[in-house]
Amino acid sequence: MSTAAELKKLYQKGKKRKILAILFIFLALLVAVVVSVSLGAGSPRFNEAMQAILARLFPFLQIDPGPTLTQTIVLDLRLPRIVMAIIAGAGLAASGATMQGVLRNPLVSSYILGISAAAGFGAALAIVFGIGVIEGYGKYLMIINAFVFSMLAMVLVYGIARLRGITTETVILAGVAVGYLFSALLSLIQYVAPEHQAVRAVVFWLMGGLNSATWESILAVFPIVIVTFVFMVQQSWNINVTSMGEEVATSLGVHTKRVLTITMILETLATASIIAFTGVIGFICLISPHISRMLIGNDHRFLIPCSAVVGALLLLCSDTVGRLVLQPTELPVGIVTSLLGVPFFIYMLMSKKRRTWR
């Protein structure tokens, strides 16, 4: 057998292993959905929950949907929350994997690029002072503010980086500067807020949560996340080449600045749309790509989808834990993901497996 044939055989074997790993995680996600829908305060029995879901999905089968209370808990409260956890986790994780690859930095996230701080500032303006970039939208004012200021942060980062030439270093440093700017403005709002309740609402929003998820919010977020995800995967080969270094990428005909600009826009759109509805949820965009690299390596054609499935699984499990650990009250999911993320990074620092990043 020739060397080329052997290499092709090894490639096909590795490709099959990566696909199987993604499918296995996806099956674990389906199991987590089934478990999560029947757990929590006031939950109906498992068979009643499944009966209500099947009756809604397949009305032509004429399945008895069960008691009205069960339908309300499962279909109007529990299921939207689960679906939002999957969408948000997948979007944040895919965005994290994309930006870490194109910027060649394992610590890049929406925090580092200033997106989260900007979203928090926009939400705080609406919560404390009722000020919005677009007036007259009532309950949507906070959501619109968070989204617009997240996009503004990206524009500022891109503009500052372009003044010195768009490189990975200038983008990261510009992101850190913009993040500190919006963090300072957010602290100022909390300091001068006239009402204690308003400050409490801002702090609670910054913790992140899925308790306000509705089918309406899912319909707003899902199209943005799925479209940006498709384009991220489409850019995966360019990201692979870019992660080898600018000189190598240029020699292979890849325009690194264009790839960086496109991925920044995609990552910001996905992250901003999610944060606007869920608040700031940390660590999912950081730890999901790392876990995926440990499982399948650095090929972004597989890493981005794998990170999305891992992120969805992690956020869903975190939200389920948050609902159960302090019943009948809930622990914000942002706190749970942080409690999971910190030990993971300590483990990464102490373990030789941190070398999975190259």
Image (cartoon, rainbow, N blue to C red):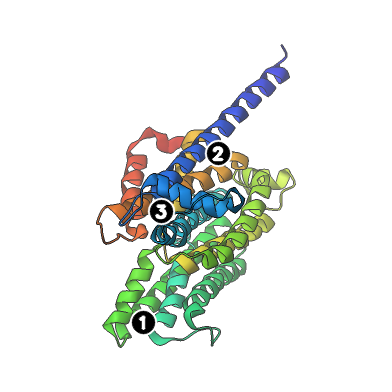
Q: Residue at x 47, y 72 (%)?
A: 118
- Per the image, the residue denoted by label 1 is 189
247 sits to left or right of 105: right
Q: Is residue 257 visible?
A: yes
- Per the image, the residue denoted by label 3 is 283
Q: Secondary structure at mark 3?
A: loop
Give x and y (percent) for residue 23.
Answer: 55, 35
335 sits to left or right of 142: left
Give x and y (percent) for residue 83.
Answer: 49, 55
Q: Residue at x 30, y 56 (%)?
A: 41
- Per the image, the residue denoted by label 2 is 298
Q: CA distance from mark 2 to mark 3?
A: 19 Å
Asked if marks 2 and 1 touch (Cβ < 8 Å), the reply is no
Q: Earlier in the sequence, mark 2 or mark 3?
A: 3
Q: Nearer the viewer, residue 28 or 189?
A: 28
Give x and y (percent) for residue 133.
Answer: 54, 83
- Give above or below for 281 relative to 193: above
Q: Nearer the viewer, residue 37 or 211?
A: 37
Other residues around mark 3 within 10 Å, as few (<14) / some (14–19) / many (≥20): many
Asked if marks 1 and 3 touch (Cβ < 8 Å), the reply is no
Q: Residue at x 33, y 61 (%)?
A: 332
Q: CA distance from mark 1 to mark 3?
A: 25 Å
